[in-house]
Image (cartoon, rainbow, N blue to C red):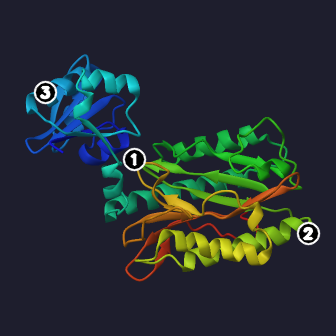
Amino acid sequence: MDAYLCVRLSNIRYLTGFTGSNAALVVSPAGAVLCTDGRYAEQARSEVRGAEVEVTPDPWNAAARRMRALRARRIGFESRHLSVDSFRAVSRGRADRFVPVPDLVATIRMRKEPGEILAMERATAIAAASLLSALASGVRGKTERDVAADLAREMVRRGAEGISFPPIVADGPRSAMPHATPTGAAIAGDGPLVLDFGARWNGYCSDETVTILPPRPRSPLGKAFDAVRRAQAAGISSVRPGEPCRVVDARVRDSLDRSGYLKYFVHSTGHGVGLDVHEWPSLSPRSRERLEEGMVVTVEPGVYLPGIGGVRLEDTVKVTGSGCERITFLPKTRTPLV
């Protein structure tokens, strides 16, 4: 490639520090140019490092002009993140010169530097303290939506920039939906309560899931909880440098298979975390990556029993020189959190 067009905003932030919502970054042997609009003139000049800043009413037109000036014959672009309309604007009838490529920056982002991990640890501490505070005030009788809102507000109050994603609060049979949207239903306290949440600090995300069972859960739920806990332990124990990501996923599935719950596990074992809450690598049967020191991934098996409820336990771990260490620290046992 003679040039590379970067348009994914989290990639642009990673490469330059720019946190605005509208930009295109042109990278070539001649240097890097970030094109953005007038709303971000001062912000870009104070944030951007390693790139020239061009402020213009039309960043796509500016990026096209910059690439024409380079006389680039092969221009790589982030095909997963560039819309058709934006591609038309930036290619300007020269589409044959544009080469769709995998997300090259995402492969760099998989391995975190110490400062990135520290930011995620800070976000995790804020999120965990916020959850404990929300639970201590009592959730029974509140709606799922109210608990999710309380949790989000508490994370911001404790210093988070914001939330990593809208919290999932799912009670009773609704906990059998892995990505349930909180509703106006009141939390009864007699079924599993799944809470999936995360905070954002200095741009970096945390991600953790706990499942709270009643003191005497119905037999299927107690057995499912124990099966998920064993599967998660098997997955975490296999996280080490050099291990294929699909092997970690396979260890989790083998454990659930032995417990008789594999058919109720409907998603991958985990994913990378960083500036985005879902990043590479993926811990799934289709993954082609191997774990490396500095990667940060989740391990989050779940069992979802239709009409009864679900159990998901999620921790975020960092890959070390010899194994892994948990970043999240809330207990994943039947012991009540508060």
- Per the model, the C-alpha gap separating discs 1 and 2 is 42 Å
| Image quadrant in which the N terminus is located | top left
Q: Position of residue 295 (x, y in %)?
A: 40, 66
Q: Position of residue 178 (x, y in %)?
A: 70, 51
Look at the numbered disc 2 and give the secondary structure of its residue. helix
Evaluate if marks 2 and 3 touch, with contact meaning CB atoms under 8 Å apart: no
Q: Which residue is mark 2?
A: 219
Q: Answer few, some or many: residues within 10 Å of disc 2's Cα (few below 14, many 20 plus, some between 14 and 19).
A: few
Q: Which residue is mark 1?
A: 203
Q: Answer few, some or many: residues within 10 Å of disc 3's Cα (few below 14, many 20 plus, some between 14 and 19).
A: some
Q: Residue at x 77, y 74 (%)?
A: 226
Q: Which residue is mark 3?
A: 68
Residue 241 horizontal side relative to residue 101, left or right: right
User: 212 above or below 249?
Assistant: above
- Per the model, the C-alpha gap separating discs 1 and 3 is 33 Å
| Image quadrant in which the C terminus is located | bottom right
Return the disc, 1 or 3, that comes first in the chain's sequence: 3
Q: Residue at x 33, y 65 (%)?
A: 114
Return the disc, 1 or 2, that comes first in the chain's sequence: 1
**Circle 2: residue type:** Ser
Residue 296 horizontal side relative to residue 259, left or right: left
